[in-house]
Image: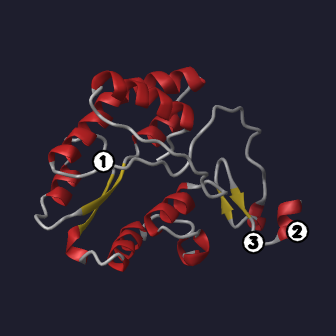
């Protein structure tokens, strides 16, 4: 959750130093706009644009269902589909539970660490890069664990981040549908224009 391209480059460098025998393949795509976690991450797990899940745009609770439905559409039995959230490293109880299923063949894992770091970072880009370097050992341990369990690993991000100075919180009152710190959703174009 929240890994930006420049932070991926820092993480990739750490991975290449620690696991030079790994083969990394890269490609890029853009996040859905607005790049809110609840929208972008659901799009990843559903493998569909947000217009297919309008009732859950403000939450992530349907991710496991989206993930299971996608794989069932690919003829993978529901018992073989795993989902784990709030995983930070290869040593995670949530991950242990998910991988403890002897039938699991595909697993979707949400790693929130970068997003947590980002929301508390006070040193800007340099601080984020240092934090990513520190976290890289945990990220590598997660990938190691997945390889040890026989999985092929695909890593993606729902959206990135950038250091910026805010302008404060606009006072919209009831005009705004969803009022986040970095994005606002209006259901009326006139309200948005104001």
Q: Which residue is mark 3?
A: 187
Q: CA distance from mark 1 to mark 3?
A: 34 Å
Q: Residue at x 17, y 57 (%)?
A: 99
Q: Residue at x 78, y 58 (%)?
A: 172
Quadrant occupied by the C terminus? bottom right
Judged left or right of residue 22, residue 33 is right
- Percent coordinates x, y for residue 102 in the rendering: 10, 64
Q: Residues within 10 Å of mark 3 (few under 14, many from 20)?
A: few
Q: Considering only vertical position in the picture, is 14 above or below 77? A: above
Front position in the image: 96 or 149: 149
Q: Which residue is mark 1?
A: 87
Q: Considering only vertical position in the picture, is 20 above or below 183? A: above
- Percent coordinates x, y for residue 115 in the rendering: 48, 42
- Tag 1 and tag 3, C-beta contact below 8 Å: no
Judged left or right of residue 10, residue 40 is right
- Tag 2 and tag 3, C-beta contact below 8 Å: no
Q: Which residue is mark 2?
A: 190
- Percent coordinates x, y for residue 59 in the rendering: 50, 65
């Amino acid at each position: 959750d929240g890994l930006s391209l420049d932070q991926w480059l820092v993480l990739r460098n750490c991975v290449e130093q620690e696991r030079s025998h790994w083969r990394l393949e890269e490609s890029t795509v853009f996040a859905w706009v607005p790049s809110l976690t609840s929208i972008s991450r659901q799009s990843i797990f559903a493998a569909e644009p947000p217009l297919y899940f309008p009732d859950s745009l403000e939450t992530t609770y349907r991710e496991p269902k989206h993930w299971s439905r996608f794989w069932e559409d690919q003829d993978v039995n529901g018992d073989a589909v795993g989902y784990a959230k709030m995983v930070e490293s290869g040593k995670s109880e949530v991950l242990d539970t998910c991988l403890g299923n002897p039938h699991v063949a595909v697993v979707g894992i949400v790693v929130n660490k970068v997003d947590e770091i980002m929301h508390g970072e006070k040193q800007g880009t340099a601080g984020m890069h240092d934090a990513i370097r520190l976290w890289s050992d945990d990220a590598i341990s997660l990938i190691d664990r997945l390889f040890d369990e026989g999985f092929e690993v695909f890593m993606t991000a729902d959206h990135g981040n950038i250091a910026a100075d805010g302008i404060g919180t606009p006072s919209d009152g009831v005009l705004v549908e969803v009022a986040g710190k970095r994005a606002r959703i209006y259901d009326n174009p006139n309200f948005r224009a104001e």
